[in-house]
Amino acid sequence: MAKIGPTSFKYILHAKFTADSLIDKPDVIGAVFGQTEGLLGEELDLREAQKNGKIGRINVESASSSGKTNGEITIPTSLGMAETALIGAAIETIDRIGPSKATVSVDKIEDVRISKREYIMHRAQQLLEEAMKASDVDTTELLQKLYEDVRQKEFVEFGSEKLPAGPDVEDSEEIIVTEGRADVMNMLKHGFSNVIGMNGTNIPKTVIELSRKKIVTLFVDGDRGGDMIINSFMQQGHVDFIAKAPSGTEVEELSKKEINQSLRAKVPIEEYDPSLKREHASASPKRSSQPPVEVPQEIKEKVTPLVNDIIGTRGAFLVNEKFDILGRIPYKGVEDAILNLENIYMLILDGIITDEIAKAAEESEIKYIIGSKVLGASSTVKLISYEDLGYKYK
C-alpha cells in the first residue's frame, strides 16, 4: 500500500447504520468503499485518501437482534472540516449493505484536537510559570526561544552523512527523498516530517540503505537536474514512486498546495518510464523471494474446498483459525479492506498474491495467504500458491 506516511488525525467521523438482515463487518467496509467510489472525485476517494494517510483505519462495531443489524462506523481523518463533512454526506447515501437494505446517518464529527489544545494551554501555563520563577527572562525572549527550540527539534541530521531530515524518517514505512537541505526545510514547514535530503545529486549510502527497506517517493525539481537525479537514483537504490515539482520550479519554493498536488500526481516507477524500470531491475538489489512452501496435509484438506469455491469469483475469503468463512470481499482493493479488519487468520484469493497484498496482510497480522500465484514476499505471512496445494494452475 502506498501512502505518504503517518499523519495526526484532526477529526473522527461517527456514523450509525441499520441493516434489515444479519451482516458482517466486511459487508459494511465494502459498502463504504464501494458505494462512495466516484462520488467526490479523485482527491476525496476513500481508497486513495487512505493510501495517502488522509484517513485512517475504518472501524465498525455492530450488534444483531431480531434479524437486524445495528452499529457504528468511525472514520478518523486528517482532512479539513469541510472535506470530512463531504465524506460524511457521501456515506449517508449508502442504501445497501451486503444483501440487505440499509440506512446510514452521521451522528457527529468529533474534533480530536480540542483535548490536545486544552492540554497544551494548561501545560504551557505551567512551563511559563516555572521558567519565570527560575529567571527574570523577558516574556518575548522566552517565546522566541521556545519557537526556535521547536523548529530545531523538527530538523534532524540523519545517518553517518548527517543528512537533513524530518523526525519521522526512522519510524515511517514510507519516506520522501528530496535533493537538499532547503527542500527538507520547506517540506517540514508545510507539515511533512518523513522527508530526507541527499545534500546534492550524488546518492548517499544512508539513502540507498533506506530505499531497500522503505517505500520511497523520490520528489525532484521540475527541470533537467531532477531527471538526472532520477536516473542516478535508479542505478543505485530502489524507488517506488516518482513525484516532480511543476515544470521550471524547485521543491524548496513550493507552497503547501503545490507540494500536495505534486505528491498526489506521483506515479509508480514502472509507469514513469519503462526503460528506467528495466535499468532499475538489473542494477538494484532484488527484494527477498518467497521460498517454496510445504503445506501440512491437514491444512490442505481444510482449505481445498474453500479454494474450489473461490476460483472464478474474482473474490477473496476471510477465514478464521477454525477455517470458518468470516466473509467474502472483492479481489480488487483487497489490500484496502484487510487493513480495516481484525482477527483474520487466513486470506484465500481468486487471484495473484502481490507485494501490496502481502504488506497489508503483515500490518493486519494475517498468518496465511493462498492465491493463484505468489509474486509478493513476506517474512511473517506464509504465502501459498495453488500449485503448493497440488493445483496445476496456469
Image: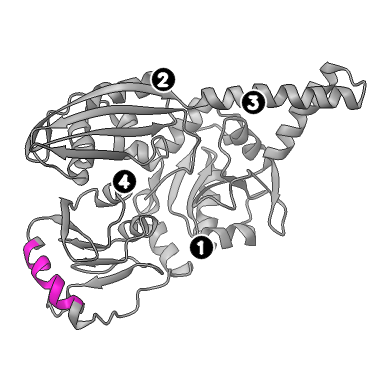
Whole-number angstrom distance, CA of label 1 to CA of label 4: 27 Å
Compared across the picture, whether 207 is left or right of 279 comes to right
Quadrant of residue 89 within the rendered picture: top left
Along the polypeptide, which appears first: circle 4 or circle 3? Answer: 3
Q: Which is in the foreground here, disc 2 or disc 4?
A: 4
**Which x, y percent locates residue 53?**
42, 39
At 45% from the left and 46% from the top, the residue drawn is 242
Residue under numbered circle 1? 212
Whole-number angstrom distance, CA of label 3 to CA of label 2: 21 Å
Residue under numbered circle 2? 81
Along the polypeptide, which appears first: circle 2 or circle 4? Answer: 2
* Mark number displayed over residue 340: 4
At 38% from the left and 35% from the top, the residue drawn is 55
Label 3 close to label 2 by CB (< 8 Å): no
Along the polypeptide, which appears first: circle 3 or circle 1? Answer: 3
Number of numbered discs visible in the structure rendering: 4
What stretch of residues is rendered in magenta?
299-309
Label 2 close to label 4 by CB (< 8 Å): no
Under circle 2, the secondary element is: helix
Compared across the picture, whether 290 is left or right of 125 comes to left
Under circle 4, the secondary element is: loop
- The crowd level at tag 2 (other Cα within 10 Å; few <14, some 14-19, many 20+) is some
